[in-house]
Every structure is written in C-alpha cells, then in structure tokens.
Image (cartoon, helix red, strand yellow):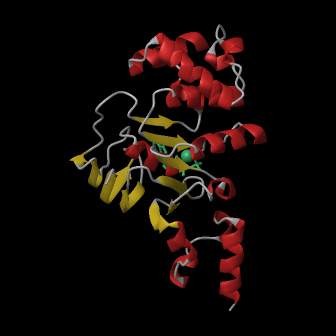
Amino acid sequence: MLYELERVSFSYPSGDFVLKEASLKIGKGQKVVGIGPSGSGKTTFLQILAGLLKPTGGSLFFRSQMGVKLQRPGEVVMAFQFPESCFVANTVEEEVFLTFREAGLSLKRGEEKLNKLARAFSFDIERFLKRSPFSLSKGEKRKLALISLLVLEPEVIILDEPETGLDGKSIAALYRLLKGLTAETLILATHQIEEVYSLADVFIYLFDGEIVFWGSKEDLNHAPFELRKKIPLEFLPFELALKWKGNQKC
Ligand SMILES: Nc1ncnc2c1ncn2[C@@H]1O[C@H](COP(=O)(O)OP(=O)(O)OP(=O)(O)O)[C@@H](O)[C@H]1O
Ligand SMILES: [Mg+2]
C-alpha cells in the first residue's frame, strides 16, 4: 500500500476537528477522487496526504513508514486550489527553471518535457517567458502550475480542484492528460463529479470532516441504503443519482 491511514484526525490550532478519524488505504497507481461540499475538509485532507500538514491524531503511513517522507524532490506533488500560491519567481522563465533545478533535470530534458506538456494544454509558453507569473490570467496560471508540477515526473499527483479557472477545452485537455497517467497515483478533489467519474477507481466522500464513504466505483454503485441517506444526490454523477433516486422512491 502507498498510503495507510488509521483513525487520522486533524484540527487547526484555532478550531474544531477538520478531519475526524479517517481510516483508509490508497494503492499505488490508483485514481482517487475526493468529493464533498465546501468546507468539508478536502483541501486539508489533501495537504495531509502531501505531507504539508501533520495529523494531530491517529497514524499515517506512506510506503509503510510513519509520516510522508520523500525519497526525492517531486516524488509527491500537490497543485493548490489557488495556483499562484506556489509561484516564487519574478518571471515564468525563472519559475520553470527553478522547477528543473529542484528536480535535477538537465535543461534539455526539462525543456523537452515542458514543451510536450505545454502542447497538450495548448499553452503557448514561449509567449509568457518574460512575464511575471502573477500577471497571467486565471487559466494561464493554472496551466503553468500544473505543467511545472507534471514536469517533475511525480509518482503521486495531488490536485485540488484542478479545473478551476480553465475553459471547457482546457478542462477536456486536462482530463485527457490525467487519463494518460497510468503508473502514477492520482488523488484529486473536485466539484466536477461528472467529468471525473470515468477517470476514478476510488471515491472518497467527505462531509463535515468525516469520511462517510471510501471505496470503488462498484461499491458506490451498490451502496447500502443507510449510506445513500448520507450522500445528497447533487454529489453523485447523473447516472448514479438517477439510480439512487429511483431506489429511494421504492
Ligand atoms: N488555516 C486554517 N485555520 C483554521 N481553520 C481552517 C484553516 N484552513 C481551513 N480551515 C477550516 O477547515 C475547514 C475545512 O476547510 P478546507 O479548506 O479543508 O475545506 P474544503 O472542503 O477544501 O472546502 P472548499 O470546497 O471550499 O475548497 C473549514 O471550516 C475551514 O474554514
Ligand atoms: Mg478546498
């Protein structure tokens, strides 16, 4: 197992529990989708998996070791909900080269990968090289942040609402790209249930810091009635919502 969580809890110094005794496992290469309303704890949960926040209770094992200890930079990456929060350089060019350096990539190798990713996103990176990354549009910032992370060849990719700020065509390109990642473990939080349904093999439903469901698409399809009462239909893909709704009428 890549991740094993045993009754993991988290509370910010100022507040209540944001994650309440989460127990689950994530296998290598799995595509995991976290769903839940605003404020349910998705971002907090992702940050714990990325090793950016430490649980305040319970045990988290990553590759059978306590805590998230990385073997190399870029092994686990997380793209934040607000992409500009990870920019540090004055120009897009510097931002990209800092990433290469962090990953120990040669300029040639890094550029090849960068150009390939930029093409996949229809992102004309040449045009922006001398600009401040903070001056880019919302969608451009999102693309730059995603490309800068994917160029690191991460083994675990954690994405927090990655479609935010992207237009329809770019969202389609993003999901095409994510579908092409077979070996990588992908963990993403989203409100776009319909789009991620075909991509996901594991679902995590979070409500008010509590994981009410963790399991495969098959398990979700055959969820018992007790569980169905805990997940409002708006958090399900249309096809499943229709099925659950039909059942609830019986
Ligand atoms: N730094 C912080 N200090 C105190 N409380 C916080 C902090 N960050 C988040 N919270 C609180 O923790 C709870 C969960 O927040 P979180 O950002 O994880 O939710 P979310 O599911 O990602 O929401 P959204 O869909 O709006 O992004 C919220 O009540 C939020 O106000
Ligand atoms: Mg969030």
Residue 88: percent from left, percent from top? 51, 17
As drawn, 124 above or below 75: above
Residue 3: percent from left, percent from top? 33, 52
Camera sees residue 40: no
- The image quadrant where one finds the N terminus is bottom left
Residue drawn at the location 70% of the way across and 88% of the way down: 249
**Lateral position of residue 88 relative to residue 155, left or right:** right
Comparing 28 with 6, the one in front is: 28
Residue drawn at the location 69% of the way across and 39% of the way down: 173
Residue drawn at the location 27% of the way across and 44% of the way down: 67
Looking at this view, name the residue that lies furthest to the right.
168
Camera sees residue 125: yes
Looking at this view, name the residue that lies furthest to the top.
130
Q: Quadrant location of residue 24?
A: bottom left
As drawn, 218 above or below 119: below
As drawn, 174 above or below 219: above
**Lateral position of residue 192 relative to residue 189, left or right:** right
Residue drawn at the location 64% of the way across and 66% of the way down: 236
